[in-house]
Image (tube, rainbow, N blue to C red):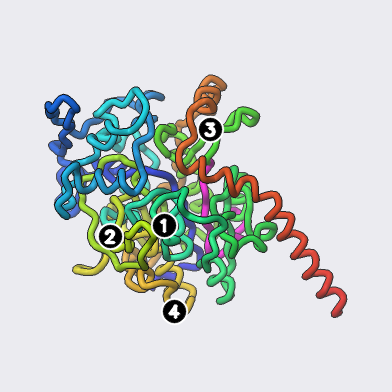
């Protein structure tokens, strides 16, 4: 087995596999990408029907980098329509994306927006990593749900019992893989930009002062010093700050994907230049598809329990991009899960950590079934150095761009983040006080 001592995960927001990587390897038989003739029908209110094919803008202007705009639907009912269409019969035909988009509230919806897919030249960082190492075309969101249930699968191996962001009670009272790592002697850190979604996990509140760090400059510094923990989880910037002149780099529509490219480059460059490069596995993925088109139907999944909405989490969500980076990963590879087994999903990360660090019994039936990612590390030695550095061309946001984003309506993820944002100062103070009391008790015992 490859000698992996550090796992780094960057989880971006709301893009499908076809949207970001569908045209990575045109015509390659072992890669399930776009052929160019994929389409959805738009059933207009007047009874007419229009065919809307997949397409590309041809350039990466600031406007094209933000497609689709406005934000597509991502509620459970929206995703059900996207997968099964207007008249569901149980067959996932992936033909309801345009119809669902054109039924979203508000004005300015172009039926072509959700069928737009980038070409590799427009996403040079993600595409370069995918070609230099491995791209997984069988990684599905853990559930056909919004951001929060899928991010819960990343951290707890379950969806929290609800299908939409707003329905999930806060704080999350679920055991996490972070504390499981800690219990088995492995260190971890959450590196974040503005507000970590993981702070809504009550299991981590007492660790906020010690295990949560700002991404810049602390992630790069730790990588350069060879001091990354066994598990690093990176959260992108979710919010616009006019004060700091910063805009989101999470790729969530309609946020500019060029800033997400810059973040991917920053993470890779830090890991690649560090002394632990040959012992590190980097995973770049997205939490859910965000309403963007994908042509591959999600398969059935191991259920994780019924919900008030009547859904037992017995099927996966739409495919999302996933790139695995390590000098043990052959360049140009397309790792697949074992034949006739479950596909990769977010719980594959937990399954991988479980194998690497000996975490004991699986955290959930889904985690028990999930294939780990070590099969992607097929080289006997760390002999694939990859690019020594990847330079992204994203410029600093202009004040006009920041101002425009500041006035856009908040997306579902941002709206849900407001509650933990209000709680965070109190949570951090409580955690700091608890840590202070614990240290005081230790000193008194001495």
Query: How many numbered marks does the figure carry?
Result: 4
Residue drawn at point x = 23 percent, y = 69 percent: 341
Image x and y of residue 377, in percent: 35, 65
Q: Label 4 belongs to which residue?
A: 361
Residue drawn at point x = 47 percent, y = 31 percent: 394
User: Helix, strand, or loop for circle 2?
Assistant: loop
Q: Earlier in the sequence, mark 3 or mark 2?
A: 3
Give how far apart the Cα atoms at labels 3 and 4 are.
41 Å
Name which quarter of the figure residue 41 lies in: top left
Residue 234 magenta: yes
Q: Label 2 belongs to which residue?
A: 315
Local packing at callout 4 (Cα closer than 10 Å; few below 14, some 14-19, many 20+) is few
Label annotation for residue 40: none
Asked if labels 4 and 3 touch by Cβ distance under 8 angstroms, the answer is: no
Image x and y of residue 295, in percent: 20, 46
Image x and y of residue 84, in percent: 20, 48
Give how far apart the Cα atoms at labels 2 and 4 are.
23 Å
**Which secondary structure class fits the magenta region best?**
loop
Q: Label 1 belongs to which residue?
A: 162
């Amino acid at each position: 087995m490859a000698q992996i001592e550090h796992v780094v995960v960057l989880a971006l927001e709301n893009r499908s596999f076809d949207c970001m990587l569908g045209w990575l390897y045109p015509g390659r038989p072992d890669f399930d990408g776009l052929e160019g003739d994929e389409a959805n029908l738009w059933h207009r209110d007047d009874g007419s029907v229009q065919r809307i094919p997949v397409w590309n803008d041809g350039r990466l202007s600031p406007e094209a980098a933000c497609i689709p705009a406005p934000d597509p639907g991502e509620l459970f009912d929206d995703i059900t329509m996207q997968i099964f269409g207007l008249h569901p019969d149980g067959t996932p035909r992936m033909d309801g994306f345009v119809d669902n988009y054109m039924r979203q509230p508000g004005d300015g919806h172009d039926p072509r927006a959700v069928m737009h897919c980038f070409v590799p030249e427009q996403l040079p960082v993600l595409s370069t990593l995918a070609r230099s190492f491995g791209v997984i075309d069988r990684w599905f969101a853990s559930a056909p749900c919004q951001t929060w249930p899928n991010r819960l699968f990343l951290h707890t191996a379950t969806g929290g019992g609800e299908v939409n962001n707003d329905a999930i009670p806060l704080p999350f009272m679920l055991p996490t893989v972070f504390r499981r790592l800690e219990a088995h002697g492995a260190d971890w850190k959450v590196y974040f930009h503005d507000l970590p979604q993981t702070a809504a996990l009550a299991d981590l509140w007492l660790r906020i002062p010690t295990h949560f760090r700002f991404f810049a400059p602390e992630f790069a510094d730790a990588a350069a010093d060879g001091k990354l923990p066994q598990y690093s989880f990176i959260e992108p910037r979710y919010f616009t700050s006019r004060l700091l002149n910063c805009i989101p780099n999470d790729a969530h529509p309609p946020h500019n994907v060029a800033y997400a490219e810059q973040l991917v480059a920053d993470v890779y460059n830090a890991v690649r230049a560090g002394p632990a490069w040959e012992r590190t596995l980097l995973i770049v993925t997205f939490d859910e598809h965000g309403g963007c088109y994908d042509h591959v139907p999600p398969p059935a999944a191991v259920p994780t329990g019924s919900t008030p909405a009547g859904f037992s989490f017995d099927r996966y969500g739409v495919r999302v991009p996933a790139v695995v980076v390590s000098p043990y990963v052959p360049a140009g590879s397309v790792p697949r899960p074992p034949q006739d087994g479950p596909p990769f999903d977010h719980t594959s990360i937990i399954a991988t950590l479980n194998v690497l660090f000996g975490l004991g019994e699986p955290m959930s039936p889904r985690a028990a079934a999930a294939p780990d990612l070590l099969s992607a590390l097929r080289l006997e030695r760390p002999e694939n150095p990859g690019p020594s550095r990847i330079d992204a061309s994203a410029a600093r946001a202009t004040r006009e761009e920041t101002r425009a984003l500041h006035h856009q309506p908040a997306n579902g993820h941002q709206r849900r983040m407001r509650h933990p944002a209000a709680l965070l100062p109190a949570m951090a103070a409580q955690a700091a006080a608890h840590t202070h009391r614990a240290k005081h008790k230790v000193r008194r015992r001495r």
